Amino acid sequence: KELSEKELTKRISLTIEKNSLPKEKALAYEQFIKKMIPSSWESFAKKQVYIALGFLMSTCALLNIAHCPLEGFMPLEFDKILGEPDYTSTVLCAVGYEKEKTPYVKTRLEEKDVFF
């Protein structure tokens, strides 16, 4: 979702207020955020999604819940299906319990083939 100037100013003000930032630090923080937003906000937001994905996958692993992150999808088409025009899909993660165990054995490369 795009952040309007009004929303951005409100969020900056809230951060400054909640952290009791002195004027010079508050001004520096505001300038930094406003400089960063136009060019890299989307990139920053997408990276934040991967932090949440990591926590989701860790939690699933601890609870023995099957999970699989998925990137090979068409975000624009997926967004149409979701019907949320203000948001953009970044990554999917299938989560659930296996109905039955798969007969396939997981395979991994040997360490010597991965690390040099």
Image (cartoon, grey):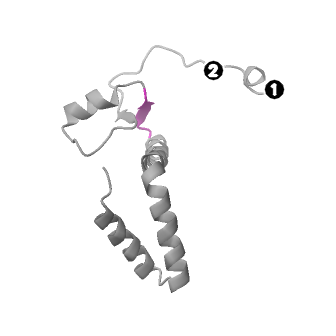
Residue type, label 1:
Phe
Q: Quadrant of the rendered structure where residue 100 is? A: top left
Examine the rendered structure and indicate whether residue 25 appears above or below residue 50: below
Examine the rendered structure and indicate whether residue 96 appears above or below residue 4: above
Which secondary structure lies at badge 1? loop
Which comes before the other along the chain, label 2 or label 1?
2
At 47% from the left and 71% from the top, the residue drawn is: 30
At 33% from the left and 71% from the top, the residue drawn is: 10
Quick one: which residue is furthest to the left in this view?
Answer: 83
Residue closer to the observer: 14 or 61: 14
Quick one: which residue is furthest to the right in this view?
Answer: 116
Asked if residue 36 lies left or right of residue 11, the reply is right
Q: Quadrant of the rendered structure where residue 109 is? A: top right
Residue that label 1 marks = 116
Residue type, label 2:
Arg
Coordinates of residue 99 in the picture (x, y in percent)? 32, 25
**Magenta region:** 64-71
Residue closer to the observer: 25 or 112: 25
At 21% from the left and 42% from the top, the residue drawn is: 84
- Residue 95 numbered mark, or none: none
Callout 1 crowding tier (Cα within 10 Å): few <14, some 14–19, many ≥20: few
Callout 2 crowding tier (Cα within 10 Å): few <14, some 14–19, many ≥20: few
Labels 2 & 1 near each other (Cβ < 8 A) = no
Coordinates of residue 50 in the picture (x, y in percent)? 47, 44
Coordinates of residue 52 in the picture (x, y in percent)? 44, 49
Q: CA distance from mark 2 to mark 1?
A: 16 Å
Q: Nearer the viewer, mark 2 or mark 1?
A: 1
Residue that label 2 marks = 108
Coordinates of residue 116 in the picture (x, y in percent)? 81, 26
